Structures are given as structure tokens and as C-alpha cells.
Image: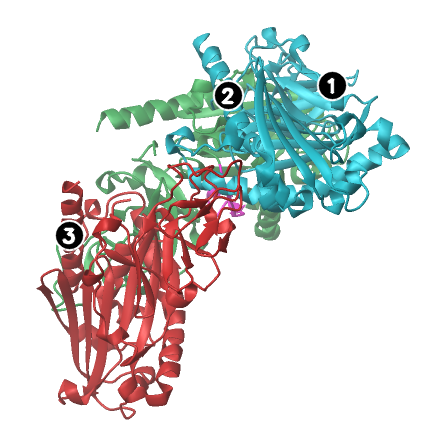
Chain colours: A cyan, B red, C green
Amino acid sequence: MRALKNIWYMAAWAEEIQPGELFHRTLLEQHILFFRDGTGAVKAIGNRCPHRFAPLHLGKQVGDAVECRYHGLRFGADGQCVFNPQGNGAIPRAATVPAYATVERYGVVWIWMGDPDRANREVLPQFPILEPADYAVGHGYLKAKAHYELESDNIMDLSHIEFLHPLFSTEAVRRGKTESAQEGDIVWSKRFITDDTLPSFLEEIFGLEPGTPADRWLDCRWQAPALIELYSGATPTGRPREEGREAPSVHFFTPETERTTHYFYGMCCPRSSGGAMADEIARMQTEAVREPFMTEDLPVVEGQQQMIGDVDFWSLKPVLLPGDAGAGRARRVLERRIAAEEAAG
Amino acid sequence: MRALKNIWYMAAWAEEIQPGELFHRTLLEQHILFFRDGTGAVKAIGNRCPHRFAPLHLGKQVGDAVECRYHGLRFGADGQCVFNPQGNGAIPRAATVPAYATVERYGVVWIWMGDPDRANREVLPQFPILEPADYAVGHGYLKAKAHYELESDNIMDLSHIEFLHPLFSTEAVRRGKTESAQEGDIVWSKRFITDDTLPSFLEEIFGLEPGTPADRWLDCRWQAPALIELYSGATPTGRPREEGREAPSVHFFTPETERTTHYFYGMCCPRSSGGAMADEIARMQTEAVREPFMTEDLPVVEGQQQMIGDVDFWSLKPVLLPGDAGAGRARRVLERRIAAEEAAG
Amino acid sequence: MRALKNIWYMAAWAEEIQPGELFHRTLLEQHILFFRDGTGAVKAIGNRCPHRFAPLHLGKQVGDAVECRYHGLRFGADGQCVFNPQGNGAIPRAATVPAYATVERYGVVWIWMGDPDRANREVLPQFPILEPADYAVGHGYLKAKAHYELESDNIMDLSHIEFLHPLFSTEAVRRGKTESAQEGDIVWSKRFITDDTLPSFLEEIFGLEPGTPADRWLDCRWQAPALIELYSGATPTGRPREEGREAPSVHFFTPETERTTHYFYGMCCPRSSGGAMADEIARMQTEAVREPFMTEDLPVVEGQQQMIGDVDFWSLKPVLLPGDAGAGRARRVLERRIAAEEAAG
């Protein structure tokens, strides 16, 4: 499939990959096997044995290698065959699987989907709201039957929350002022709503007395390939942001295939406000949004994919509204970078 | 898919589209949304929002417009966007969906699948057996996983009833005389069976004493795209038709996709004979044929489609029997008209 | 699909085709109908009626012919229409379905998938271990979602039993000496393991005292299209083969489609050793291997197919190990013969 390769994608939440267990996931149509070596580091290699193409995830981990269930070949974290139980035990030079660079950070397993030699830990994005010392973060996951850019569009234009999500919204959303901005390849899509009355779920999150007229912001920060931080907060109307409380969240999308997406999301609770309860709060909020994500967003996003079918998104000439500016910029940045990567070979 | 466009298709039974409710159906591979306006008139528009391509049927009706569930755009019955809740509310000129001409008549919602400007109410076929003053009509519906012409073939050659349908048939069917005729683009496929003994289900319908030797006719009248009236009746052997009773029925087929078909059927009970019971009789007879249609016809017709697979029907060189004459004529009329429409651009 | 045509394939176990019952199976992507004529002989014809393409298996057998459920045409074992109940009963010359040559031997129904005129009973392979007078044979069947050559590879390289099948194996398998040989188009893939201790399931089969150090052989004899005899036996270590006991088995594969396979297998118990219990022993052993075949082999073989996807097996450049020699030879024989058949037109 067409996608940016030389960049970090989110592969999994760290706890999805347990010591001694093989974990497999398809990313960008590549079958990948994950496991932890003796030091606990996550390793990722191709899931297809080069001998007879059996899926390696049916096998087992032996030391720092993975043993194929079919004929017992073992592969190390660098993708090289390290043991051949058959015959004289000679290891054919070609007995290798791809090895992927990975980094575990922020409770997230990141994977570099392009040339491993170009994998650069330095370009791993920084996410202050995922810093464990400062934030507790819930870990949510959904699989969507839709192209991943339909998912990032969904977050980048939050005008939909008024129509889709009674839990998060009020009629005032539509009155919101929107603004998009670009800093290099970072795209902001911001929404600011004044003098609103929030649903009680949000009043609680933002620490507002029931019925307090409030000013609310919803600022999305996108970066390639489809990593979005959402800064959502509120103050009593007219008060400066510094006095308000923010409930940030992350929304990271990784294509599984051309038409299916891994959606990783997490609510982030500042330890400064959550205190001893921060982890529990983040977990509960993340759990709370699962229901609307599943029953409200998913049918729409998967419905979009069905209505689009096989054709190119742009070929259908989508009508553009002002609120689409941010999503449009993100799509253009991504398109430019993919084209550049393709041009570079 | 290849199909005649500038013609009326049956879209639904009238009661399938209830006031205040959105109804959607795919016809000729086009996703269509139906609703009733304030006057009760059925309206049909494209089901794909032109903004982000969400399916409009997930939304709701607001006055005479449909509101998209995703971002709140509203579309009127003419397909124009009539309300944009976002930003300054400006409505982009391109914010339109296709609008389809519809007519509600005979308890049927008809839709014109081609150029709406050419939609002509005058060319809507007349069906005397669907006139509410004269006939009570049952409303049946099935979905078949087969090309719609396999379905119209099924009705146009009723020799199969002897083999498929114990309820409707006797061995005498095969002795029937068949005849096909054409009046312009109307195709008749007629079958006449003399001196038969009918199953009790039919004796009751035709008002014959049990065991009466009977003459029976089964006359199908096809017109494009796939609208068939079936005039089925009987008299005691040797008596003129005028003395007999007729149980007409309609069989209207509309392609959903190249390989799936909406099958609308209805038994028609003359009010002259059915009296106060006519509606109940029509309903019960229509209900009674559902079982054989589902368990006897459907496996064969869907089996045909499976055996045909992806290839063109004619490329398999079907063996032609005399009873196929009517179905063959219907196929040729349709082919000629589709070709003419394509040639006209 | 690409496959050898002018050769005998296994179509079914004899008892799958019962007198008076229609049996249908897809072989090499051809839909085939089987039935027994009045003499009990198995007949095979195309399952698609040439009239309207209804599947004949929905119909019924009438004498030595099959009646189409749709319009009552009947077809004899030679594929000719023998009866037309419609109209004047004339039988169109083109009303034929393909007829396939079949032979019933060894409790197996064999079918010739190419030119029936070239069907040659003389080239039907001989299988001494299926001779009813000498062996009792269990009849097993599985359907696999994988190309049939992945299945024959599976048998031709039995090094996998150590990793997949605790029931059949010990660690000594990997120490086995392998050898492949070719006699014309017959390919042998042999494995010999000395000084092993066998699992109790095998000790019982081979008549060894518990814990006896044993020498074991696993010799596979392949012939086109994918018919494998597996000669598995053991003796106390150092004793000549003649003193041991052998538990042969057959593994016959017939493609259903490019990616699905009929797998017929059977354990063969020599009447000389099994005596009055031979049939029961063969039945029980065949039943016993169903579980490992289903739960151990099948996930791997179907997993291979998923990992291979749509691409050609060789294009993925499988790494070759010494144990693959036999399977590789078999693949090359088959490829050469298919190419020759294609070249011959």
C-alpha cells in the first residue's frame, strides 16, 4: 500500500507485548512478529519464515530467538537464522527475515517501517503529555475498517462532536472559531468555543461547578504519519487558559492495510491535578470514551469507507468547509512526503 | 453496472418508507436515501454526503431535509445543501448530492435511474391489476444473490413450476402449449394447459370444486427493465376464460448490484371476487408463496449465478428450449435498449 | 487453475457416493456431479445444466440419468441429454454436459480431469498397501485452505513431526538421515532415525516393548499429481527391517481451487498382523491422526498460504534445506509435466 515508510509508527502499547510471548500484527500490509529479548527490549521481525513461509507467530520464543513451529529454524532479533536443527545444522546464508527497528517509549512500541539503517531514534516525536512523570495515560485500542486518513480527518475536524457525541458536546460547538496553522510539517487544527454550558461529564473533567458558563478549546496537533495530540480544556468564561484544566489525549493511527486501521488512543491525566488517583482517572476516562468511539464514530468512519469504495478520496471531489482546513493540510503534508520518498527511490 | 438507466424501476413498497424515517437501498450500485417530505411525497437523493462521504442514512430528517450525522450539513429533496451549521454557515456551491425523480403509484415507489430531466411520469407503466379500486395486492420482498435477468427468466418460463413447486403444479404443466409474442417492447410468454387436475391450493384460488378437470393458463407480460405481470387462471375444462377466475400477480425486479437483486412480488385479488376479504386474501396468498420462493426458487437461481460465476451469460452458450422464447425476447429487448442508451451517450 | 489434467486424481472415497444419491464436489475449479448407475458404477458429469446453468446436484437421479431440478432435462452418464419433458420433447444437439472418466479401485473413486478419450485405466497407479486382501485402510478427509503442493510438501519433509506433533515424534527426528531419490517420475523422500525412544502411541503401532531403543524409518513415495504413500516402521535398534512392523499410510491431495485442497488420508493395517481386528485398527488409527492433522498441521499449512498470499511460491525464493530435496523434486516433476501438457496444447 501507499504510505510513508521512513518514519516511526505506533506498533502497539507496551503491555501488548509480554515477555516470553509472541505477538503479531500486520502494519502497512507487512506481517510482523514482536517479542521481548532477555533484556526486555522489544524486537520486531518479519512473521514469514523464509524456508516454507509458515507464520512464525505459531512458534515459540527460545532465548532471544523465535523458533518456527514447522521445521524448527530459529531467528534472532536481527532477522538472521541462528539455528537449524535439520541435517548437519548448516545455516543457509539466505535464511533471514526482515528486521525492524523499534523503540519503546511513552509506554508505546514504535516501529520504523522503512530502511532500518535510516531508523533514527532522534526523530521519534516528543510527547510531553505521555511523559510518565507528568501524566497518567490510559491505553485504548480499536480496529477500524477504514483508511487511516479518514480516522485522522475525524480528529482534525472536531465539529462532528456536536452531531455524533452527546457525551462530549453541546450545540455551541458549531459556533466555535476554528483556526489551522502549520509549523514545518506539524499541523494544528484549533477550535475555540466561548460561553458554553458543558455536559456534566466534561464539567467534571475540567473541574467546573455544574452550570458554569465556560470557554472551551479543542486543539489538535497532527504530525506524520498520523499522530495527533488533542488538547481539550476549559475555563469559566472569560478566564485565562492558565486557570483552566486540560484533559489532553492522544490519537495515533497506523494502517493495517489500505482499508483497515489500528487506532490507539489514550486520555492523559496530569499528575499535578490527578494526584494519587491520576492513573485510575486516566484509565476510567479512556474506558469511558470507548463506547462513543465504537458506537458513534466507528459506524460513520466505516460508512465513509463503504461509500468511497475503491476509488481515490480526492477523485470524489470532497466539498471543503472551513473546519477541514487542518485535516486538508495534514493530508497535503503526508502526500508531499510520500511523493518525496517515492521519488527518492 | 450495465443496466437501462432512463426508465422507472421499482424502488420500494410504499410502506417501506415511513414519514420521518430515513430509508436507504442500493439500486444499480447507487446508494440511495429515501424519505417523505412534509406533504408525504417520497424523495430520493444520493446517500453519500459530498463533504466527507459519510452515509446520510445514519443521520436524521429535519423538516424536508436530511441532516448528515457527521458534521450536520442538511440536504433538501433536490439534492442541494440547504444548511451548513459550521463557521459562517456559507453553503458551498458544490455541496450537492444527486436527486432522483420518484413517483408513488400502485402502492409502489418508482424511481428514475437516469437523467432526472428526462424522468417522465407519462411513461410509468399502467398496471390495472394494481389499481387499488379493483384489486387488493399483497406486498412481498426477497433479496436474491443473482443477476436480475436470471430472476425474470425464472418467471418468463414457468415450465419450472412442475419441477420446483409441488404447491403450484401438476405433471400436466409439461404438456402445456407455450407461445410468445411481442407488442412493441412488451413481451408475452404464455402457457396453456388443458384437462389438468390442480393441487388443492390452486383449486381454492380459482374457485374450482375439488377434482374438477381444469384448463389453466399462465400468461406473463414482461416490460423493461424487469417488470412482469403474471396472469394465472383456470376454468373447468372446455369452458371459456370469462367463466374462470384469475389470480394475477406481479413480479418486479430491480438490480441491487451486478449479482444481487431486489425481488418485489405481490398476489392480486380482484375486489369483485374477494369482496370484504380481498385484502386479507391477497395478503395471505402473498405470504403463502414466500416459502416456495425462498426454499425452492432461490436456491436454484442463486445456484445458477454460482455456476455462471463471473462470465457473461451468453458466452456460456445456453441451450435454448421452446419455452425460453419469451425470456429470450425479453433479454433481447433489454439488450437493444441498453445498447441504444449507451450509443446515445 | 494451472494443474496437470491428463492424469487420475482422487475424487472421493467410494462410500461418499451412495446409490441413488447425487454427490457433488469441485475439483480443479470444475463443478462435478457424481452418482452411481444401476450397476453401481460411479459416473461423473459436469454439474452445470447447459440449459440455464442450474446446478444439477439440486435435482435427483432418475434411472441412470440425472434430472435437473429447474426444468426437468435429464442427462446420462455420457453427458448427453436423454430426456426433455418440455414441448415436443426434442432434444437439442447441444444439450450436453462434460463427462469424466472414472474408475473405482482401492475403495477410491478416481477421476480423469483431462481429455476423456485419453483416460487410461492402465496408468492408474498401483497401491499394494490399498489392496483389500492385504490391508485394512481407514478413510479420512480434510479440506485445507491452501494450495495442494503445500500439502504434499508437508508429507514429503517429515522433519516437521518433531516440532508439530508430540504424538508422533521425539527429538531424534532431527538427527534422522534423509535421502531423496527418483525413479522416473516417482520421487522418494526417506528419513532414517537410529537409536530412538518412541512415544507410546508409536511403540504400540510398531509392536515394541515400552522403552525399547528403536530404529525408525519414514519413507515417502510421491507420484503426480500429489499421491503419497508413507511407509513408516520401526525395529529394535540394529535389527533388520524385515523383523520390524510397518504402519503405512496414504496421503492423496486433489486441488479444489487454486487455494483449497481436498486431503484424503488413510492408515493401512496389514491383515497379516491385524488379523480380525485389522479394519478396526485401521479405522481407529485414521481417526487418531485426525486431531493432529486438524489442530497441528492445518494451522501451519493454511498459515503458509496466508503468508504467501497471491504471489507465486518460487518468486518468494524459499530457502532450501536438505530435507526439502524430495519435495523439491516432486515440484519439479509436476512443473515439467504441466509445462509439457500445456505445450502439447
The amino acid type, in three-letter code, at marker 2 is Ala
Badge 3 marks a residue whose secondary structure is: loop
On the image, the x and y values in percent for residue C7 come to 32, 36
Q: Chain of mark 2?
A: A
The amino acid type, in three-letter code, at marker 1 is Arg
The reply to whether discs 3 and 1 touch (Cβ–Cβ < 8 Å) is no
- The mark lying in front, picked from 3 and 1, is 1
Any mark on residue C94, and which? 3
Badge 1 marks a residue whose secondary structure is: strand
Which residue is at 62% across, 14% downward?
A: A79
Q: Chain of mark 1?
A: A
Q: Which residue is mark 1?
A: A105
Question: Same subunit under labels 2 and 3?
Answer: no
Image-quadrant location for residue A69? top right
In the image, residue B179 above or below residue C113: below
In the image, residue C316 above or below residue B130: above
Q: Nearer the viewer, residue A32 or B92?
A: B92
Q: Which residues are magenta?
A: C130-145
Report the Cα–Cα distance between label 2 and label 3. Answer: 54 Å
Any mark on residue A3, and which? 2
Q: Residues within 10 Å of mark 1 (few under 14, many from 20)?
A: some
Badge 2 marks a residue whose secondary structure is: loop
Report the Cα–Cα distance between label 3 and label 1. Answer: 72 Å
The amino acid type, in three-letter code, at marker 3 is Ala
Q: Earlier in the sequence, mark 2 or mark 1?
A: 2
In the image, residue C252 above or below residue B213: above
- The mark lying in front, picked from 2 and 3, is 2
Is residue B310 a member of the stretch shown in magenta?
Answer: no
Is residue C141 a member of the stretch shown in magenta?
Answer: yes
On the image, the x and y values in percent for residue C227 come to 44, 35
Which residue is at 36% across, 89% downward?
A: B276
In the image, residue A3 above or below residue C15: above
